[in-house]
Image: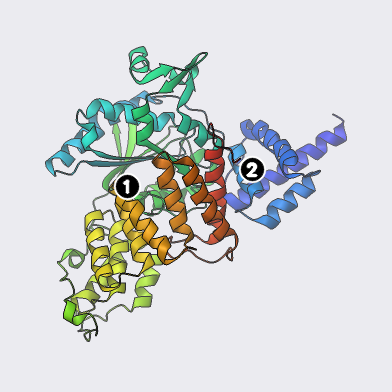
Amino acid sequence: MTATQTSALVACEERLCAFVRRHTGLRIHDHQLENLRRTMQEAFARFGHTSCDSYLRALESAGAASPEHEHLIAGITIGESYFFRDQSQMDFLRQVFLPELIERRRRQDERYLRIWSAGCSDGQELYSLAIILQQLLPDIDRWNLHLLGTDINAASLSRAMRGRYSGWSFRATPEALRQQYFGPDGDQAWQIAPQLRRRAKFSYLNLNEDSFPSILTETNSLDLILCRNVFIYFDPGVVLQIMAKLNACLVPGGCLLLGTSDLIDSAAQEGFELHALANAFYLIRGHDAPPDAGFAASRREIPPPEPAKRAAAAPLLPSAAGTPLAEPQEIIALLGAESWAQALQAITQRQQAGDSSAMIWQFRAKALANLGRRREALAACDQSLAIDPADKHTHFIRALVLLELNRLPAAEDALRRTLYLDRNFAEAHFQLGLLQLRRDRRPAGLKSLRNALAIADTTAPDRRLHDAAGMNHGRMAAILRNELEIYQQLPGGKKK
């Protein structure tokens, strides 16, 4: 390579690094430059670019939802992981946090756990947790386990779904565990046991782009989040924003584990309590009353509407505290801002003042669902549908709650009712596709995802989704393309 060519390559790399940092908050370190160069060359071949200028123009003009943009970000965030990474943290989870959480749930007669591996790479971290839970729960089949892994690298997610690993992934795994939970698969490869693979769910999510917590992405009301060695890619300001959102994803007392290389300042720890046990450091979401645990009024019983009063709305009485009642548009704004507890308080005050409309019950269901109060949310959906059986949004919220309760046939029925009322409901096609894939009906699932993508692609990109705060149709189209790429990389997944 001539000096001129070398200079041009360096200049292109600098411009790409500046673009990535400006648009995503990600920082490209020296050790990542090789990934950047390889990704750039792949992009030239994949998208037909012949120069750095052409590539950068495409990135700038197409925006964050473009295939070029997603390909670039995925290419520079290739992660390397292995089973039971960071033994101190794994010991903490196995010996302290998970046993205490399991015992507490048993006392409450609530057999469920909700765990998210954010930036899950090839899935070793989430499957490590699945193995630990298999060991800790002799009655595991009686538990509703929500084990979610997300990443922005479609190829990594496809590998996670396959659950097939080389011997290098087991360098911190006792041989007895590998023999118990994996089977040989070809030359020096191992396949995770089917029952463990079925318990884990993997999907696309960009921590810097996408909205969470949300019942739509199943990132709400979590007991444990692992986000290890992810923040090394982000600027401090972006880390601060993501940390605040991760805090909101956890239930009070929920745990966040970061990686040893994730150095964050004290401002990013707001709302958390920092703890240490031996060599394991972890963050616990505080038990402060706001924003989720307070508002005693929101937990007071709301009487169901009486049939005789459904036709005509009763005049609203002043709130018990003498404060003005929130108008529906104000509640919609709170829901759109994902201020679930504040929205629930405003909804409760209106209901106590006499508002028994289908809409206010739907609002209540949405807030409760995102706060993790699933059975209450289901009851609120039923109250709303008793008044207005043809509201597609209530049927959709009901489907999401049923999914979280692992009532899959009922959830599918609710999604089909939603689509019966509106065949162009992109979110319902999306969720139906994921559900069908989860139930091993791949052709039907991929068809539903393509239906959702076709609708999203023909809708104004900046049009907001009704049931997904902070997301528009353009962003949804980008997510759907990544989801389709994930499944199409699996054996038998290519479209004929």
Image-based side of 24 in relation to 288, left or right: right
Closer-to-camera residue (92/419):
419
Query: How far is the residue under mark 1 from the one under mark 2?
Result: 36 Å
Q: Amino acid at mark 2?
A: Leu
Residue at 52% of width from left, 61% of height from top? 472
What label does residue 222 carry, if any?
none
Closer-to-camera residue (493/228):
493
Residue 304 on image: x %, y %: 17, 71
The N terminus - image quarter: top right
- Figure label count: 2
What label does residue 408 carry, if any?
1
Q: Which residue is mark 2?
A: 72
The C terminus - image quarter: top right
Residue 411 on image: x %, y %: 33, 52
Image-based side of 28 in relation to 358, left or right: right
Mark 1, other Cα within 10 Å: few <14 / some 14–19 / many ≥20: some
Dot 1 lies on which element?
helix
Q: Contact (CB < 8 A) between labels 1 and 2?
A: no
Dot 2 lies on which element?
helix
Q: Is residue 352 above or below residue 373?
A: below
Q: Is residue 166 above or below residue 341?
A: above
Residue 385 on image: x %, y %: 28, 68
Residue at 29% of width from left, 45% of height from top? 406
